[in-house]
Structures are given as structure tokens and as C-alpha cells.
Image (cartoon, grey):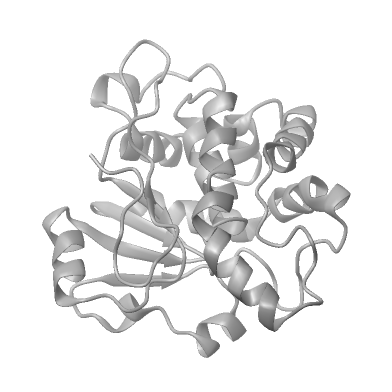
Amino acid sequence: MLRHIPLGGMYNLRDLGGYPVPGGGETLWEKLLRGDNPEHLTEEDLQWLLDRDITTVIDLRSEAETRRKPDQLSSQPDFHYFHCPLLSEGDGMPNLETDVGQGYFRMLDGSDLVAKALRTVAAAPAGVLFHCTAGKDRTGLMAAMLLGLAGVERADLLADYQVSETYLADIIRQIKTKVPTLSAFAGASKAEYLSDCLDLLEEKYGSVSGYLRAIGLTEEELTALRGKLLPPDHTKGGPVFG
């Protein structure tokens, strides 16, 4: 199975399968993909997704971002496209590196936008590809909530988040040559960013599942989300972390 998936012009497309879960086993492959904006996909790339029944696409970007660079899959008849922005128009990430974790938490805290995106994942009839622009911040938070709910250990959540920096390194270098004023930590995905966010989330909500219940997800929706990543015998009980 491929963790990092080379499709079209996507730099940071990855599978959430293969992470160990409590009770043995691992998260399911080819069910949930996280990525950057789908573009330059060939017919073969589209068929790769269709062969795996990954037909629901969730775009976490703002309205302005979708206008500037439309999601290629949004116009494909075999895919079901949903626009679920995780930031309100005008919101953005912090300017200071020390505030990134808090900025992530503010994005999550009591958010109807996050609830809508996760409900869309839960309701999807088959596989899901969710993405933002680079597949790092908003996509990374979605991935952390899904993996955390499935019971994946924090070390693996952080590793899944951290590797974005590796896959985005070339494109970030290109951008910095054109935009020298870009912040020094642009493109970074240090483990402490997400760890700080998870500390704040656990302090307020107790766990990922506690957070998801607080933003309005039902037990049926939580079971459906677990079912996207866990074998049937793992989906009923509450996992250790989630």
C-alpha cells in the first residue's frame, strides 16, 4: 500500500491507513485520503481514485481560495464534491510561530464548520479525499481528529502531521524565492504545533471524542467516522485516546 500517493500535481496526498490501533490491527487503507488541492490529474489518476471507490471530495478551503484555484474533481461527474471551509472568510493563521498551536485550537474550538466537515465524512457512501491548499494545517487538523477518534496514539498523530513539511519542501522553496517576505516558518509542520493544540483540546474537552460530542456530533456519526478507518469489530467501543 502507498502512504504517499503521487497523483497529478499533488505534492502532499497521503493515505490514513496502516496506523496501529488499540486492541490490535491498524487503520484501514484506501478509505480516507488527506491532501493538497487536486490539480493536473490525468484520466489514469481519476481512474485510480474510482477503482478504490474514493468518490467523495471535501474541500476545506475558503470561497476565495476555491475561486482562485478550483478543485479539479469538483467538475468531474463521477465525484461528489462538497465545499466545507474550516475558516470563516477573513480568518487566517497566526503571524507568530509560538501561536500556531493556539491558532489551531481556535479553529477547532466549538466549531460548527468542523462539525459540518466531519458530518460530510461520516455520511459519505464510500472513500473520501479531504484537502485544503497545501494539505498541512486545516487538512492536518481533520486528519488528527479522525485518527484520534480511531484510537491512534498521539505519537502517530504527530508523525502524520509532521511529514507534510517534507513533501512540501520543494514548493515552499520555490514560493520563498518569489515572496522573500514569507514568514520563516511557512510550510513548517513541527510536531509541537499540533501537540500544543491537542494539549488545549484535552484540557477543555478531555479527548477527541469529547470534543466531537461537544460540537454536536451524535454517537451514530462517531460510529460512522470510526467505521471509515476501523474494521467492524473495532467501531463500537470508545478508543483509548479518542
Residue farthest to the bottom, as pictured: 67
Above or below: residue 162 compared with residue 184:
above
Say left or right for 95 vs 191: right
Above or below: residue 142 compared with residue 73:
above
Q: Is residue 97 visible?
A: yes
Above or below: residue 232 compared with residue 85:
above
Question: Which residue shows up at 51% across the image and 39% down it?
Answer: 160
Q: Looking at the figure, which quarter contains the C terminus?
A: top right
Q: Quadrant of residue 19?
A: top left
Say left or right for 112 vs 180: left
Question: Which residue shows up at 40% across the image and 40% down it?
Answer: 225
Question: Which residue shows up at 41% across the image and 20% down it?
Answer: 21
Q: Position of residue 205 (x, y in %)?
A: 72, 32
Q: How many marks?
A: 0
Q: Position of residue 28 (x, y in %)?
A: 28, 34
Q: In front: 215, or 79?
A: 79
Question: Which residue shows up at 62% across the image and 68% down it?
Answer: 173
Residue farthest to the top, as pictured: 23
Q: Looking at the figure, which quarter contains the N terminus?
A: top left
Q: In front: 188, or 241?
A: 188
Q: Position of residue 237 (x, y in %)?
A: 42, 18
Q: In front: 228, or 216?
A: 228
Q: Is residue 85 visible?
A: no
Q: Position of residue 133 (x, y in %)?
A: 54, 69
